[in-house]
Every structure is written in C-alpha cells, then in structure tokens.
Amino acid sequence: MKEITEKEAFSRMASYCSMAEHCCSEVIEKLKKWELATEQVECIIKALQAEKYIDEERYCRSFINDKIRFSKWGKRKIAMALYQKRIPDAIIQKHLNEVDEEEYLSILKQLLEAKKKSIKAKDEYEFRGKLFRFAMGRGFDVEDVEKVR
C-alpha cells in the first residue's frame, strides 16, 4: 500500500466525515489501517475536531435517534453500542436521558404488538417470558415493557 502523508490522511478523513457522522474511534481505526504514527493520528483527530468534522456529542445524538427511530433499539442496546465505540459514559447518559419517553414507549408498544401475533405459548407465563425476552434482546428494560403492557 502506498504511504500516505498526514496532510493526505486529513483530507481523506475530512471527506469521510463529511459524508456521515463518525466518532473518534471509527476514524482512529481507519487511520491505523493506513499505518500512520500515533502522533500523526492524534494530530489528525485534533484537527478534525477543531474543524467540527468529528463531534462526539453530535455523533451520540444522531446515533441514538437513528437506532431508536429506524432500528427500534432499546436504550440498553444503544448504550452498549456507544460504549464499544468508546463514547464517554457521561455523553451517552446525557443524550439517552433526552430521549422523548412517549415516543420511546410507543415504539416499544408497536414492537410488542407485532411480536404478540407470532408468539406461540402453552400458557400466559410462557407467553410473558417470550415477550420479555424479545424486548430485552432489543435492549429494552423490564420496567419499559411493564409500562406499555
């Protein structure tokens, strides 16, 4: 692979970050594949942040909105995914607390109503267990399921 200069790497990453929201860990991972020195990677990250190509707050907010509205994930699954992307916990919790509770619960209610139609169970206990497992697998809490049932 051709050696990439720091200036070229910054230019490529600016273009990459302009197309969609990305967090620092995604950009760092990509830069490391190009075998840049750690000092160069840090310099590029600082420059991208200064130019607002990367913003962890903005990334977190858009990630949460996308996953709740389109992927229909619960807060636990979202928090875990953001944690794996090395987003600070304070930022994650701040933006998860800003989620509109009414919209969040209506999404869960739609999911549960659809799932209820396909559950086959011999009794109410088994039915509830399957419903709760489904919701928890999507990242929702037991308390959330209880609220919409």
Image: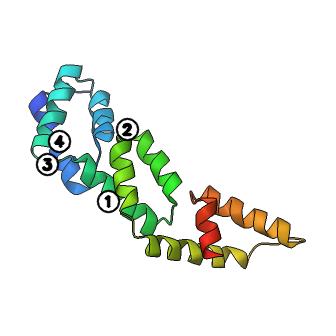
Q: Are marks 2 and 4 in contact (CB under 8 Å)?
A: no
Q: Residue at x 58, y 66 (%)?
A: 144
Question: Does the residue at mark 4 contact the one at mark 3 (Cβ under 8 Å)?
Answer: no
Q: Nearer the viewer, mark 1 or mark 4?
A: 1
Q: Earlier in the sequence, mark 3 or mark 2?
A: 3
Label 1 neighbourhood size at 10 Å, few (<14), some (14-19), many (20+)? some
Residue tagged 1: 62
Rendering coords of residue 134 (x, y %): 67, 62
The residue pinned by badge 3 equals: 52
The circle on residue 12 is: 4
For this view, does 61 lie left or right of residue 104? Answer: left
Q: Is residue 128 left or right of residue 145?
A: right
Q: In this orientation, does residue 4 appear?
A: no
Q: Earlier in the sequence, mark 4 or mark 3?
A: 4
Examine the image and state in which quarter residue 131 appears: bottom right
Which residue sits at x=84%, y=65%?
126
Inter-mark Cα distance, 4 to 3: 15 Å
Q: Amino acid at mark 2?
A: Arg
